[in-house]
């Protein structure tokens, strides 16, 4: 894999959601504990409490996370994601979003709304190497 790799996972949890239902499958699927997440309390549009939770995974754990997530996403969703990979770049980082609802049901599915935001970062110094670098990282 690459020399330097980092993943940041962000989850927005609304006051009506049960955090255990989100973090149990995260632990089972990716070996990430709730205690590892930093918590930031925010306020929604209507004054409702929102919890923003985030965790940073370094190189070894990030590599393991990528292997696991790629293996759990359906081939058709992964193929579609990779075909449109340029839509998911911001600077030299790649963004994926997985469904919170599907995670609670112990399934991994790419989704844009109400999702866990996954930011994958690795140094890419030449713009023309960006796609190739991430395709290799995702095992393609």
Image: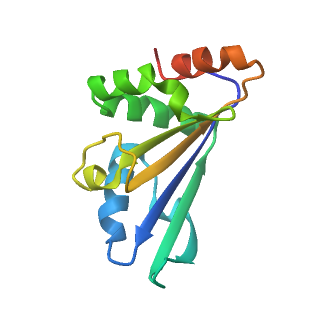
Most foreground residue, 50 or 72: 50
**How is this picture coloured?**
rainbow
Between 123 and 83, the one lying in front of the other is 83
Viewer-side residue, 105 vs 36: 105
Residue extending farthest left:
105
Where on the picture, by quarter, is residue 14? bottom left
Residue 125 percent coordinates (x, y): 78, 22
Give the answer, above or below, for where 117 lies relative to 135: below
Query: In screen coordinates, is 57 left or right of 69?
Result: right
Q: Residue at the spot x=45%, y=24% of the render?
A: 84
Q: Is residue 50 above or below residue 120?
A: below
- Which quadrant of the figure has residue 36? bottom right
What residue is at 48 percent from the left and 85 percent from the top?
47
Q: Residue at x 57, y 22 (%)?
A: 134
81 lies above or below 24: above
Residue 70 place in picture, x, y as percent: 39, 29
- Where residue 102 sits: x, y (%)? 26, 50
Q: Is residue 48 left or right of residue 39?
A: left
Residue displayed at 30% across by 40% down:
109
- Report if residue 37 is visible in the image: no
Q: Is residue 78 left or right of residue 7?
A: left
Give the total of numbered labels.
Answer: 0
Please identify the quadrant where the N terminus is shown. top right
Residue 121, compared with residue 19, is above or below; it is above
Residue 111 visible in image = yes
Residue, far bottom: 47
Residue 28 in the image: x percent, y percent?
A: 33, 49
């Amino acid at each position: 894999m690459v020399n330097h790799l980092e993943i940041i996972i962000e989850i927005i949890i609304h006051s009506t959601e049960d955090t255990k239902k989100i973090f149990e499958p995260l632990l089972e699927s990716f070996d990430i504990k709730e205690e590892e997440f930093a918590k930031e309390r925010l306020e929604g549009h209507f004054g409702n409490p929102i919890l923003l939770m985030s965790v940073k995974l370094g190189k070894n754990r990030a590599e393991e996370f990528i292997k696991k997530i790629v293996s759990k996403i359906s081939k058709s969703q992964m193929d579609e994601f990779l075909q449109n990979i340029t839509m998911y770049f911001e600077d030299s980082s790649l963004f994926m979003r997985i469904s919170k609802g599907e995670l609670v049901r112990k399934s991994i599915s790419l989704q844009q709304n109400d999702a866990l935001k996954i930011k994958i970062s690795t140094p890419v110094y030449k713009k023309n190497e960006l796609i190739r670098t991430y395709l290799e990282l995702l095992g393609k």
